[in-house]
Amino acid sequence: MLEATGLMVFYENMLALNNVSIMCEDNQIVGVFGANSAGKSTLMYTLSGIMEDIKKKEDMAGGERITVLGQITYLGQDIMGFKPSLRARQGIVLCPERRRIFPESTVLENLRIGGYLASPSQKKESLEYVFRIFPALEKIKKRVGGFLSGGEQQMLAIGRALMAQPKLLLLDEPLLGLSPLIQVVLVRAIREIRAERGISIIVTEQYARPVLPAVDYAFILENGASVLEGTREELLNNPDVRSAYFGV
Ligand code: ATP
């Protein structure tokens, strides 16, 4: 479904991604694990194309020079240089780190904004689906985003991304700062989304443990480089990886 090869991202002379190659197959859940500053968000911005917008903004403002190199193939097409809006229309939808919902809009308004590309019937169907996997959201659909708990905001952020009819959903640290109980709810939702909708998912996390049972394959990023990859079982059976990344 998506294959990125030799991705290099420089913020001025600082190398944030160093020759990273990752792959996500149809109907797969892929994990990308790494510590703070390992390059997870940079990777997600690069795959979703948001990096193109950040780069343009910096160029126009005379800010830092961002360089992106490498290749991204999605559904057999080279999408490097495609605008994020075009990638979204083709099904690559990013649910960014720290949620970024619209705090002054209600839950329902936030979800409708996510569905702006969809037809009215698709929008209705997606909305029903979002309320089915996150019943908690339906109960608070008239509440404004800013008054939601962290967990509710994360459900809303994922729900909003689902409204955009993704084929490939990019989840950047969806569990960050949430209680173990909410993490369980979100990981279950991630599995359901793949099983019921056939949506492929790339999910980044600093701590692999809560999300590991749901992933098929994972990559480990260190200082911008992909240092290890393997199936869930391969990573779990590697003693160094177990203690260093999974805390087991
Ligand atoms: P976190 O868990 O903190 O979000 P991350 O793995 O997502 O970390 P990135 O945000 O991709 O990491 O950052 C990778 C490196 O690039 C870090 O050293 C960070 O400081 C640097 N960086 C990120 N954005 C910029 C920017 N706009 N300009 C300069 N350096 C940046």
Image (cartoon, rainbow, N blue to C red):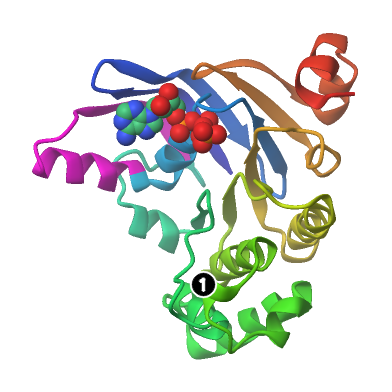
Name, please, the residue furthest toward the front.
147
Q: Could one spot residue 77 in this view of the protein?
A: no
Q: Position of residue 165 (x, y in %)?
A: 56, 68
Q: Position of residue 120 (x, y in %)?
A: 50, 90
Q: Left or right of 83: which side holds 162?
A: right
Residue at image point 90% right, 17% down: 237
Q: Left or right of 54: which side holds 224?
A: right
Q: Which residue is mark 1?
A: 146
Quarter holding residue 108: bottom right
Q: Could one spot residue 34 in this view of the protein?
A: yes
Q: Does residue 58 belong to the magenta stretch?
A: yes
Q: Does residue 7 belong to the magenta stretch?
A: no
What span is colored magenta in the figure? 51-73
Residue at image point 62% right, 79% down: 126
Give the position of the C terminus as an image quadrant. Answer: top right
Residue at image point 78% right, 42% down: 211
Q: Left or right of 11: which side holds 242?
A: right
SS for dot 1? helix
- Label 1: how many residues lie within 10 Å, few (<14), some (14-19) or many (20+)? some
Position of 147 relative to 125 (above/below) = above
